[in-house]
């Protein structure tokens, strides 16, 4: 009898995992359907901005939520991808947008390697301060570099033709291109998180000394996570430059690094959908407040929201909803 019970227990666990996987896949499918019809219900340019920042926040969340590393320098990767893509597309008219975006992503990834090698051995506030210091160096480099346009930024970046024959001048066509890029980035993060590599990252986040005692090279795992996060942040920056046809110093400023932290914490750090929710809320508030008499108080209002979020629901919106679901339906 004990043997039969021991055999039934694993099968019950597998059945629950199978049902959870099915619900997750159905939910992701519903999100894709919503994304496909969204441009017919809302302004496509606004939606593209949300998707770009959502990808940026998801990339940051991979580092903070699953590796436990708080970076204050992620704006450097967003700006690097944007500037490289903008410069190449503006300087070489025959270059197609996907090649410009790939180039920007590759350069941001390489910069992530440099950042990671210099900072990954530090922990806590020391890691955060090292990333901030290096990001500020990158910011001042962009201020002085001739190809960035300095404080004026890069303007008039052409959207071009995807693969050389699909015009992206239409906002609808551009939206579906951005949506495809977001789905690619989100799927990569989802696969990373649910892989054995992702499980090791969670173990490092929870108890790094124990992970070391089990034989894992934690610095190598954290470096790979940092590089993946930097590359996806660069992908978001490259895509954003093509959408808005400009690259500016705003993307390289430390305020942008703080903004992505706000998006992640507001939506739910350590959750896959939290950054998407947080980016949508922050971008929507910025859009609404900018058109209201409170336009000059956007930063103050976002700061108040951040404080309330940290004090009231530290798990973020998606995190709290997940807790409620587990409490009532598990």
Image (spheres, helix red, strand yellow):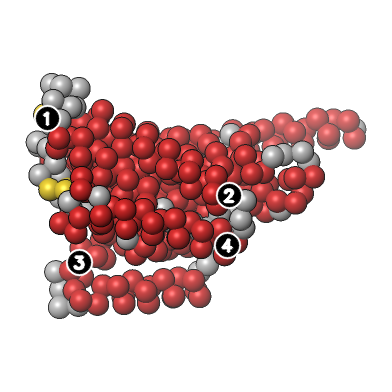
x, y percent for residue 195:
58, 34
Between 220 and 174, which is closer to the camera in this rendering? 220
Residue shown at the point (83%, 35%) measured from the top left: 5
Distance, label 4 to label 1, CA atoms, is 43 Å
Q: In this rendering, is residue 6 above or below 201?
A: above
Residue hosting label 2:
120
Residue hosting label 3:
288
Residue hosting label 1:
93
Quadrant of the rendered structure where residue 282 is? bottom left
Q: Of callouts 2 and 4, which one flags the residue occurring earlier in the amino acid sequence?
A: 2
Q: Where, quadrant-wise, is the N terminus in this rendering? A: top right
- Label for residue 126? 4
Q: In this rendering, is residue 188 above or below 62?
A: above
Distance, label 2 to label 4, CA atoms, is 10 Å
Q: Of callouts 3 and 4, which one flags the residue occurring earlier in the amino acid sequence?
A: 4
Distance, label 2 to label 1, CA atoms, is 39 Å
Q: Of callouts 3 and 1, which one flags the residue occurring earlier in the amino acid sequence?
A: 1
Q: Residues within 10 Å of mark 4 (few under 14, many from 20)?
A: some
Between 261 and 307, which is closer to the camera in this rendering? 261
Q: Residues within 10 Å of mark 3 (few under 14, many from 20)?
A: few
Between 6 and 92, which is closer to the camera in this rendering? 92
SS assignment at label 4: helix
SS assignment at label 1: loop
């Amino acid at each position: 009898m004990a043997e039969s019970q021991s055999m039934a227990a694993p099968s019950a666990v597998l059945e629950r995992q199978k049902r959870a996987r099915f619900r997750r896949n159905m939910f992701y499918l519903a999100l894709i359907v919503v994304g496909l019809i969204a441009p017919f219900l809302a302004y496509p340019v606004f939606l593209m901005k949300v998707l770009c920042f959502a990808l940026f926040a998801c990339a940051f969340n991979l580092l903070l939520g699953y590796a436990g590393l708080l970076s204050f320098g992620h704006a450097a990767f967003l700006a690097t991808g944007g500037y490289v893509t903008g410069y190449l597309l503006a300087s070489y008219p025959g270059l197609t947008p996907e090649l410009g975006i790939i180039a920007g992503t590759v350069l941001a990834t390489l910069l992530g390697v440099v950042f990671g090698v210099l900072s990954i051995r530090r922990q806590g506030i020391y890691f955060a301060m090292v990333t901030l210091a290096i990001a500020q160096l990158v910011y001042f480099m962009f201020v002085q570099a001739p190809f960035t346009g300095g404080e004026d930024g890069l303007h008039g970046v052409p959207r071009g033709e995807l693969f050389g024959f699909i015009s992206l001048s239409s906002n609808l066509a551009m939206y579906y291109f951005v949506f495809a890029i977001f789905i690619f980035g989100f799927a990569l993060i989802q696969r990373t998180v649910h892989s054995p590599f992702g499980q090791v990252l969670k173990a490092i986040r929870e108890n790094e000394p124990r992970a070391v005692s089990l034989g894992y090279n934690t610095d190598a795992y954290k470096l790979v996570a940092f590089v993946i996060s930097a590359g996806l942040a660069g992908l978001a920056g490259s895509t954003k430059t093509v959408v808005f046809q400009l690259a500016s110093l705003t993307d390289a400023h430390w305020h942008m690094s703080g903004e992505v932290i706000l998006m992640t914490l507001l939506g739910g750090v350590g959750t896959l959908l939290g950054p998407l929710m947080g980016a949508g809320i922050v971008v929507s508030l910025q859009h609404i407040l900018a058109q209201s008499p409170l336009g000059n108080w956007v930063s103050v209002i976002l700061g108040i929201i951040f404080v309330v979020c940290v004090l009231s629901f530290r798990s973020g919106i998606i995190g709290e909803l997940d807790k409620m679901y587990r409490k009532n339906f598990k």
